[in-house]
Image: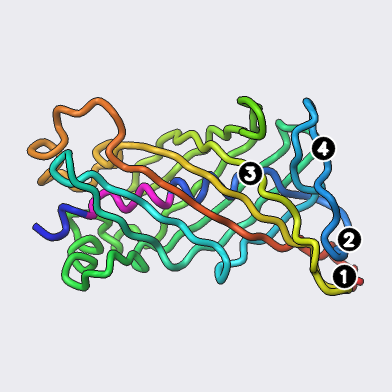
Amino acid sequence: MICKKLFSVFEIGALFFAICAVPSTSAGADHPAKPADKMAGGQALPAPRTYEVDPDHSFAYFGARHHVVGLVRGRFDKVSGTITASQDPAACSVDITIDPSTISTQVHERDGDLRGPAYFDVKNFPTMTYSGRGIRHVSGNSWIMDGSLTLHGVTKTVPLTFTFNGSFGDVPPGKPARVAFHGSAATKRADFGIGARDNVGELGTLSSPDVEIEIDVEGDAKVPAGSTGQ
């Protein structure tokens, strides 16, 4: 039953993807970080180019409802992908891959159960992905991407709300520009066919999402082909 607490961990992946979806992309030489460019409406977003997610400085956390009133937290430890930013909101994109076998809830027995056939079934579904194209302004410095999360053989649209935290101002000369984002999302584990043995008993009567996701991502601008990055 320990695993029941974490069935919704998969949702963290969604969030992680979403945050990455925050604008970042294409073109541009890699120099010390520059002030963020502005998109329509005067909202700050990264300079147009493609950014590669730094797995050592990106963290995806989740909070999964346990018996409705409880909350179990965890994370995934292996994430990779790219974020593309553009002056055109419709051209912003994100492509992220998460390894569900790296799930961690700080309880060995529970983590093993979550990797098994009753939940993530990592042997048959070794990756989860999040891909999205286009963002829309919500209010203030908030944006949303309606990306697609593929998990456990199921693909669903999972909106991601995110903010661009800014560009690093202390990047050494010759190193790629670095940016940071924060994102959040919410969904139901039952939508992905995960945790069927306890979905009805614990959360079957809930209409609201039972998994909350928070993610902080850092990304480095990719050096264009043929460029030295100087």
Q: Residue at the location (41% across, 55% down)? A: 61
Q: Which residue is mark 1?
A: 229
Q: Residue at the location (80% across, 68% down)? A: 170
The Cα atoms of the two marked residues, 2 and 4, are separated by 18 Å
Instruction: Name the image quarter holding residue 55.
Output: bottom right
The Cα atoms of the two marked residues, 2 and 1, are separated by 6 Å
The amino acid beneath tag 3 is: Val
Tag of residue 213: none
Rendered position, 83 above or below 137:
below
Q: Where is residue 9 shown, x and y percent of the image? A: 31, 53
In this rendered view, identify the residue nearer to me: 59 or 189.
59
Q: Where is residue 200 shown, x and y percent of the image? A: 11, 36
The amino acid beneath tag 2 is: Ala
The amino acid beneath tag 1 is: Gly
**Disc nearer the start of the sequence (1/4):** 4
Instruction: Name the image quarter holding residue 104.
Output: bottom left
Tell me where the magenta segment starts and ends, as one range.
Answer: 6-13
Rendered position, 75 above or below 39:
below
Q: Is residue 221 left or right of residue 149?
A: right
Q: Which dot, 1 or 4, sits closer to the camera?
A: 4
Q: Which residue is mark 4?
A: 38
Q: Residue at the location (23% across, 55% down)? A: 6
Q: Secondary structure at mark 3?
A: loop
